[in-house]
């Protein structure tokens, strides 16, 4: 089975990496919601009313219609039910399949080409470059793309509020994970390894994402 997976990875690396990362990203959010359902933790849904002063901006109205057509907008009735938040799952799936997966595929392909070898110095360089060059814009991409899919009028607010805490947490998690990644994992299975690690990381990210901004500021 591992041999077949390795052969498929060599033939269709972009497809496999995108599918794998999207799958694990969606599973992480599904696990979060399952945990909340089991312990009766009610997560607030987002609100999508465009502010009155921005109602004349066609791009916001178009974005809201597009997201509504794709079923990406939360239903306020979810607060009062025990159903899964399918719009939120769709948003995480889209981010994983179409944004994070292809981006990380290209990034690690370039990283393995530019920094060849497994010496400690080279591995530490790759870990540093990965964490401090890629991660900051990737964190920004996550929050901004989610805000766009949620039709928020201020797409930068959540990113500005949660960026520092998210980046600090990612350093504690990803630096040791990526060290073993660059030392032990073959390039063809690099995204698969990262995706499995992401199943743990995205649960943390989902928690940070779902904390309301006011509560986030007060608590953290």
Image (cartoon, rainbow, N blue to C red):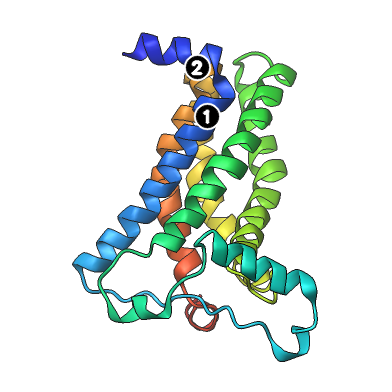
Query: Relative to residue 79, is residue 7 drawn left or right?
Result: right
Residue lying furthest bottom: 52
- x and y percent of residue 192 in the render? 46, 28
Residue 163 visible: no
Compared to residue 62, the image places residue 212 above or below, namely below
Q: Which residue is label 1 attached to?
A: 17
User: Would residue 23 be found to the left or right of residue 183 on screen?
Assistant: left
- Name the residue located 24 percent from the left edge and 67 percent from the top edge: 37
Q: Nearer the viewer, residue 134 or 59?
A: 59
Q: Give percent across and percent down for residue 73.
A: 51, 68
Using residue 209 as the reference point, say whether residue 78 is left or right of it. left
Choose the circle earlier in sequence order: 2 or 1.
2
Q: Which mark is residue 9?
A: 2
Check the image and report above or below for 110 versus 27: above
Residue plotted at (66% across, 61% down): 144
Q: Quadrant of residue 43?
A: bottom left
67 w.r.t. 152: above or below: above
Cβ–Cβ under 8 Å for marks 2 and 1: yes
- The residue closer to the viewer here, 172 or 82, is 82
- Is residue 166 in view from this perspective? yes
């Amino acid at each position: 089975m591992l041999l077949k997976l390795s052969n498929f990875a060599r033939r269709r690396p972009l497809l496999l990496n995108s599918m794998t990362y999207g799958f694990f990203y969606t599973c992480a959010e599904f696990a979060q919601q399952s945990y909340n359902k089991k312990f009766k933790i009610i997560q607030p849904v987002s609100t999508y009313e465009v502010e009155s002063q921005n109602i004349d901006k066609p791009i916001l109205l178009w974005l809201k219609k597009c997201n509504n057509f794709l079923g990406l907008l939360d239903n306020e009735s979810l607060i009062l039910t025990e159903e899964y938040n399918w719009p939120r799952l769709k948003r995480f799936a889209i981010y994983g399949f179409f944004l994070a997966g292809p981006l990380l595929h290209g990034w690690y392909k370039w990283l393995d080409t530019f920094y060849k070898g497994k010496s400690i110095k080279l591995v530490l360089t790759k870990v540093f470059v990965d964490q401090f060059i890629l991660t900051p814009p990737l964190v920004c991409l996550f929050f901004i793309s989610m805000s766009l899919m949620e039709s928020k009028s201020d797409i930068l607010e959540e990113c500005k509020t949660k960026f520092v805490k998210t980046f600090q947490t990612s350093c504690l998690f990803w630096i040791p994970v990526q060290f073993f990644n660059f030392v032990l994992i073959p390039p063809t299975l690099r995204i698969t390894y990262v995706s499995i690690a992401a199943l743990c990381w995205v649960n943390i990210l989902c928690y940070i994402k779902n904390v309301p901004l006011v509560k986030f500021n007060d608590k953290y």
